[in-house]
Amino acid sequence: MKNIFVKCAAGTVLVTGLLWATSCENDFGDINTDPSVVITPDPKFLFTYSLNSLESYQGTEWIWENLEQLLRFSQHLTTDPYELSTNINSRYSAYYANILPNLVEIRKQIDLKTNKERFQKMRAATFVVGVLHGLRVTDMNGSLPYSQAIQGRDKQNFTPEYDTQKALYDTWLAELNEAITTLAADLPDQENYGNADIIYHGDWIKWVKAANTLKLRIALRYEGQDKAKTQQIYKEVADNAVGPIVEDADQFAYLDPDWGPVGGDVDYRSTRFATKSIMTFLKQTKDPRLAIYFSPNDLTTSALDSLKKYNQALPAFIDRADPQIRFQGGPADWTTNPTVAQYYKNPLNAGSNKYVVMSTINRVFFAPTRNGGKGTFHDYMLTSAETCFYIAEMIQKGYGTGTKITGKAEDWYKKGITSSLRTMNSIAVAALSTTGLTSNADAEIAAYLAQPAVKLNGTNDLERIYIQQYLNFMRLPTEAFTFVRRTGYPKNTSAYYPRDAFNEVIPRRYWVDEPPLGTNNANWQKAQTEQGFTPNDRNAATLNSQRLWFDKNNPAFGQGL
């Protein structure tokens, strides 16, 4: 791929206005006579590269953002607090370096074809990929170059304007709508990506479903600013003849058997532990995901006997009679309860034996290649569970149903839980990790759905839908962090699932670095000012108070409405 634009790469990639330039020569004759230089790239190869790039950059993101920051901010886990390092935001550079340029090039190559009408579905699918990752970027950064991005090589535009987050949403909705229409249409003699499409293998209807699920993501991001717009988008999806992803077979999943983004860095700088809030709820509801998400501590029967022999008392927060004593969580913010937090790093001593009492995350589930592990890291980027919970949430809020989306909130809630349990179990199976379901999975899922603390009861149904949505996002940290920002759940004062006390100031966005002087500074400065941001301020308090557009009217962390 690196040889596609060997002689004239100027303006091919534009990152925050920074031009990645090489010399632009006029000796094109060399290209015409050199068979090793590709001047007309195959759209199939470009599409594979873009799809692979959705995942290939994520090693950095998992280590520096997900495990160290985002999942801690959302209280899915706890770990030593570290500052937001300059290693964050790899999603941003991946978008402009590896994903968007190739998608734009595919469209250009198709538009130049004399029989371009045969490639319209291939062209349409590129917009779904662009929106999928674009949402991940704007979720943390706000305004982005998009409508004028990737114009350096063709239009010599090296200073693209930044589209506001609202403009991005509106542009992406228009692109998704057009893509849905094209992908679902009965068009003759269409070319296909085939196996170059490493996600859906050229199944256009599945691409339509992915596009509709992305529309639901956008709809809920709109809710804090314009509920009527949320209603409109949801209604479009609910009435669409194909609909969104609501079956496990249609999930947008990266399943490369040789891929492992985390590996031994799963404990980089600090071990990751369970929080009290998530551990308490998973134990109380006998959730099959408990053993998938977290590892048991050292308090086996033998260990308890050894501790008793050496007169070593258990910490006061641990009940010796607890049938699930091997699963223990602690404060999300260690400063709120140092008496308990000390046990994150201090085991109990019994003679020469040392027993860790706190549960860590299940390292194999997150890092199946750690220590030479032979498991596979499966990444489900758009899931049926996520979609079902969105539908349940919106029906519960009164947004209604449609010709394609019918039934009650409870129906979709149950369907979402079922899908979440099965999908997380499938991820665990692929990782060669601890599973939560057995060959009797149907009965086990039914038993979980029948738990009084799980089934809807007409009293706090929306909160129950929220919490299951929250639990499902353990493997989608950006979505988890967007969820806690938009809803304010888990809620501080909840009797159902209370959020842990948290003294640390949590940033609600990332910063976008200023471009090098003399490049795109004016447009960058304009975007910062329009959003109400203090340029180059990376202080957590600033990043907390100066919010993104979608987040401006949302509740504070833990202050769910």
Image: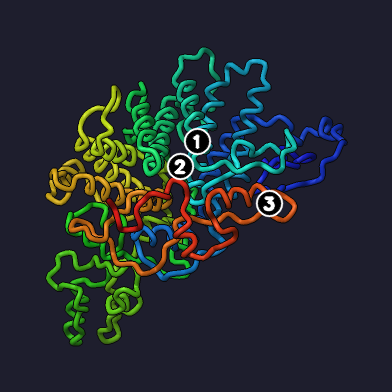
Toward the top, the furthest residue is 188
Instruction: Tell which of 263 and 130 is nearer to you.
Output: 130
Real-space Cα separation, disc 1 to disc 3, in angstroms:
38 Å
Looking at marks 1 and 3 on the same chain, the residue that comes earlier in the sequence is marked by: 1
Real-space Cα separation, disc 2 to disc 3, in angstroms:
37 Å
Which marked residue is nearer to the observer: mark 2 or mark 3? 3
What residue is disc 1 on? 198
* Residue 521, numbered label: 3
**Residue 448, can we see it?**
no
Q: As shown in the figure, which amino acid type bears the numbered disc 3?
A: Asn
Q: Residues within 10 Å of mark 2 (few under 14, many from 20)?
A: some
Q: As shown in the figure, which amino acid type bears the numbered disc 2?
A: Tyr
Q: Is residue 323 left or right of residue 358?
A: left
Residue 464 at x, y percent in the picture: 22, 48
What residue is disc 2 on? 254
Q: As shown in the figure, which amino acid type bears the numbered disc 1?
A: Ile
Q: Residues within 10 Å of mark 3 (few under 14, many from 20)?
A: some
**Residue 359, can we see it?**
yes
Residue 247 at x, y percent in the picture: 32, 33
Q: Report helix, strand or loop for mark 3.
A: helix
